[in-house]
Amino acid sequence: MTDQRFDDTGKSGIYRALENKLRIFSVAPLLCVIWLLHGISMAAEHRVLTLDQALEVAAERNRDILKAKEFHNQVRGRYVEERSAALPHLTITGQAVTQHDESLNAYADGFMPVRQDIYGAELGLSQALYTWGKVGAAIRAAEKGFATADEQFRRARQDAWRDVSVAFYNILLAREQHAIASQNLAQKVRHQDEAQRRYAAGVATDYDVLAADVAVQNAMPDVIRAGNSVRVARDRLSFLLALEGEVDVTGSLETVLTTYPSYDKALAVARDKRPELKEIKHRLAIAGELVKVADADDKPRLDLTGKYGWRHLEVGDGSGSGQIWTVGLQLSFPLFDGLKTRGKVAQAESERRSMQIDEAKLLESVALEIRDAVNAVRESEEIVKALSGTVVQAERLLQMAEKGFELGVKIRLEVDDAELNLRQARGNLARARRDYLVARVNLERVMGVLGEGSL
């Protein structure tokens, strides 16, 4: 009597149900991959940029660059404000006054009228002639502000170019990692098909089929994570470019390894070109001028003043009108202001010394950044060289392992090891190339020449 739990092939009902479920699961990864690739192709229909195009967009739309431009406008306004102290000031005033004063009855037995009406208009002039150097120092400080604004703009532009370049290379790396994960999944699916074919031919066991199915399922998370990394990297680039909607890039991580400057040469260039160093030098010059401005507050000052206008006066029954004018020199000399000026000078000098300390600290920081950047370029270059031939060798090793498995002279573990080695080799090479490109960009940034010339 035949046990009804088994069919004609000897398979149990439980095993057949498990096999059907695994076949359904084996189709799901392919559907997911198709959906992910479709999402990537849809994104490709949006704006696609090369690195040069992305940098051009950043120059026009990056928020930090736009803010630096506005700072330049603020400095221009400050210069106009300080320069106004050296130019003549003209003021037009008008008056219409009625005055009633009964105390005037005490004069000459009430002869003086108690009411007076005054109408008039005047043009006033004020011109600083001598301010003990205060006006000149303020104007020179404002002029130095233009140079400071220029260096801040250079720094903002170089920072934006570095961030955009890194985001661009991150997208290429994420796309490469997604391709590697997809290829790995496709490889697992081929192994699954092969295992099922071998099982149908009677040369494979249930374990081989189940192991292939599990391998397919385990490969799916890497594909999903890699696809999400691509989207995150694109969003980062879109943020830096201040663009609405999705953006994509076109390019490759492959690059030619070129020579790079030594530490001493890079440091010399940075001391001459780095925007932060040039900016703090301009700020030190401004601080020196501000000391002069503060020191002039208790010094003599000479101004030219004058007025010209017309006035009409009514006193009692009499009235008169005509031109009026005054002109003169006004000398002011604050003999003692409660040591206020001395306190302002002490503050200005302390601020200048603090800037000198900041300059020394910045020089040390730049030297450290240069050393780290040069070392990063050297390290990434050596890694790229070391991994250049590894991928080809890993591909050949996998082909040999798969062929040997088909012929029965290799086991599944050897094939899995070969696949893992190939995946790691491809991923490591892609990341090494990305790290090399980023290191070169960062080296140009810490030298202060990014976007302004080649190394």
Image (cartoon, helix red, strand yellow):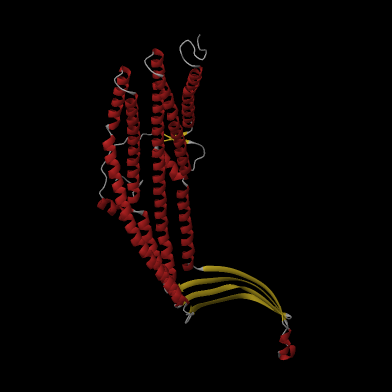
Which of 401 and 162 lies nearest the eye of the viewer? 401
Which of 330 and 216 lies nearest the eye of the viewer? 216
Q: Residue, x 57% and y 68% (percent of image)?
A: 91
Furthest residue toward top: 1
Furthest residue toward bottom: 109
Q: Position of residue 415 (x, y in %)?
A: 33, 25
**265 shown above or below 26:** below
Q: Classify residue 48 as left or right of residue 125.
A: left
Q: Classify residue 382 as left or right of residue 361.
A: left
Furthest residue toward front: 1
Q: Quadrant of residue 90?
A: bottom right
Q: Quadrant of residue 362?
A: bottom left
Residue 274 showing in the rendered view: yes
Q: Position of residue 309 (x, y in %)?
A: 60, 72
**149 shown above or below 95:** above
Which of 327 and 401 lies nearest the eye of the viewer? 401
Q: Classify residue 303 as left or right of residue 191.
A: right
Q: Residue, x 39% and y 13% (percent of image)?
A: 201
User: How many tags in the picture?
Assistant: 0
Residue 250 showing in the rendered view: no
**3 shown above or below 248:** above
Q: Position of residue 396 (x, y in %)?
A: 28, 25
Which of 301 and 33 lies nearest the eye of the viewer? 33
**10 shown above or below 68:** above
Q: Position of residue 133 (x, y in %)?
A: 41, 72
